[in-house]
Image (tube, rainbow, N blue to C red):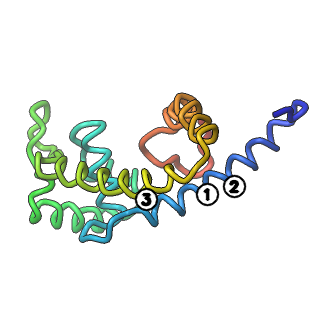
Amino acid sequence: MDFSGDRDLPAIEITTALERLTRMFLRLAPRGELSLTAVSVLSLLERSGPRRLTDLAMGEGVTQPAMTQLVSRLQDAGLAVRAGDPDDGRVVLVHVTDAGRAALAERRAARAALLSELLSRLPEEELDALVTALPAIGSLTSLMPDERPAAGRTF
């Protein structure tokens, strides 16, 4: 694609395509007891390790009381656990449990099965193009921090 040096044009086209992909991907989510925020929190804990409640709340863009309620529900379900920070006894960290990891794996497997069906309908050259784009998508997503930026903050 030649965008003649206009970086806004591909950004707009990529934004539109990713919005549609996100909507499709959300529809692939198995119906269950985990909300999108719960899955997001568990995924972050799995990927990045234990976090403070305040960090989780900020990262998800919710209030601390709302995050406290969510973590309590996750803990009651055995998917997360609170534990003291070994470096600072005053701090409590939230950890994902093995059951939380298993729930995420089951959710991913269910999505992958549904996505596999859709991918099987694509012509081989389009599937190859998606696979070829995976490293660039990985690079793009690694540029975004796990926490939501504060208003006016740039990357």
Q: Tell me, yes or no, if residue 65 can be seen here.
A: yes
Q: Do the residues labelled 1 and 2 touch (CB within 8 Å)?
A: yes
**CA separation, marks 2 and 3?**
23 Å
Q: Tell me, yes or no, if residue 94 can be seen here.
A: no
User: Between 129 and 106, which is closer to the camera in this rendering?
Assistant: 129
In the image, taking residue 45 as reference, residue 96 lies left or right, namely left
Q: Residue at x 9, y 65 (%)?
A: 76
Q: Is mark 1 on a helix, strand or loop?
A: helix
Residue type at numbered disc 1: Glu
Q: Circle 1 sits on which residue?
A: 19
Q: Image quadrant of residue 39?
A: bottom left
Q: Circle 3 sits on which residue?
A: 61
Residue 43 in the image: x percent, y percent? 30, 47
Q: In which quarter of the image is the C terminus?
A: top right
User: Between 58 and 38, which is closer to the camera in this rendering?
Assistant: 38
Q: Residue at x 63, y 37 (%)?
A: 125
Q: Circle 2 sits on which residue?
A: 16
Q: In this view, does 30 lie above or below 148?
A: below
Q: Residue at x 42, y 62 (%)?
A: 28
Residue type at numbered disc 3: Gly
Residue 116 in the image: x percent, y percent? 42, 51
Of circles 2 and 3, the one toward us is 2
Query: Which is more N-terminal, label 3 or label 2?
Result: 2
Residue 148 in the image: x percent, y percent? 48, 49
Q: Is mark 2 on a helix, strand or loop?
A: helix
Q: What element carries label 3?
A: loop
Q: Quadrant of the N terminus?
A: top right
**CA separation, marks 1 and 2?**
5 Å
